[in-house]
Image (spheres, helix red, strand yellow):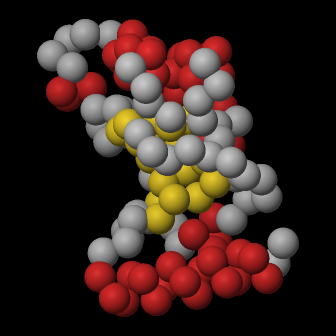
């Protein structure tokens, strides 16, 4: 995915919303300048995650803001989101690579930087 603006990367967390609606909070973040949104849901079923992702994606698309799905490549593919965030304990990014999709990987320290560089090289080679 070309041209993603990562300058204000918002990560959603319903636990911090104190009961306020997630979709409205995401819209407010976008109206406040968010350039990309990551939907992070750790304690929901796949069905609920897909439903939330569809709702958030509708708002994100309305404003032309990319949506990244946390950890769940299956959910990303199901809702046609713009990318996935894969962390250290998730599926390796090289295995998860899907054409035309942004993959964001958490990087912590020298070993992760080397792994991320190797993954990027592999993804670019396979394009």
| Quarter of image, res 103 | bottom right
Percent x, y for residue 50?
A: 54, 29
Q: Residue at x 70, y 36 (%)?
A: 80
Residue situated furthest right in the rendering: 127
Say if residue 69 shows up in the picture. no
- Residue 118 in view (yes/no): yes
* Quadrant in which the C terminus appears: bottom right
Q: Is residue 94 above or below residue 30?
A: below
Judge left or right: residue 89 versus residue 4.
left
Q: How many marks?
A: 0
Residue 53 in the image, given as x and y percentages of width and height: 53, 27
Vertical relation: 33 (above or below) 89: above
Residue at 25 percent of width and 10 percent of height: 20
Residue at the image point whose x is 55% and y is 50% from the top? 84
Q: In the visual, does 79 lie left or right of 112?
A: right
When the figure is inspected, residue 123 is found, relative to residue 68, above or below; the finding is below
Which image quarter: residue 111? bottom left
| Front-most of residues 44 and 14 | 14
Q: Is residue 90 left or right of residue 55?
A: left
Where, by quadrant of the figure, is residue 61 drawn?
A: top right
Q: Position of residue 55 (x, y in %)?
A: 54, 17
In the image, residue 65 above or below residue 31 = below
What's the residue at 49%, 47% (across, down)? 6
Q: Horizontal and vertical percent for residue 123? A: 71, 75
């Amino acid at each position: 995915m070309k041209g993603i603006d990562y300058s204000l990367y918002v990560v959603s967390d319903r636990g911090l919303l104190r009961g306020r609606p997630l979709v409205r909070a995401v819209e407010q973040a976008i109206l406040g300048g968010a350039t990309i949104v990551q939907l992070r849901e750790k304690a929901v079923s796949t069905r609920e995650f897909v439903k939330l992702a569809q709702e958030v994606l509708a708002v994100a698309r309305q404003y032309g803001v990319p949506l990244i799905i946390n950890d769940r490549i299956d959910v990303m593919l199901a809702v046609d989101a713009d990318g996935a965030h894969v962390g250290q304990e998730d599926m390796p990014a090289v295995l998860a690579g899907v054409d035309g999709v942004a993959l964001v990987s958490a990087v912590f320290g020298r070993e992760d930087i080397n792994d991320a560089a190797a993954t990027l090289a592999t993804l670019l080679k396979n394009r």
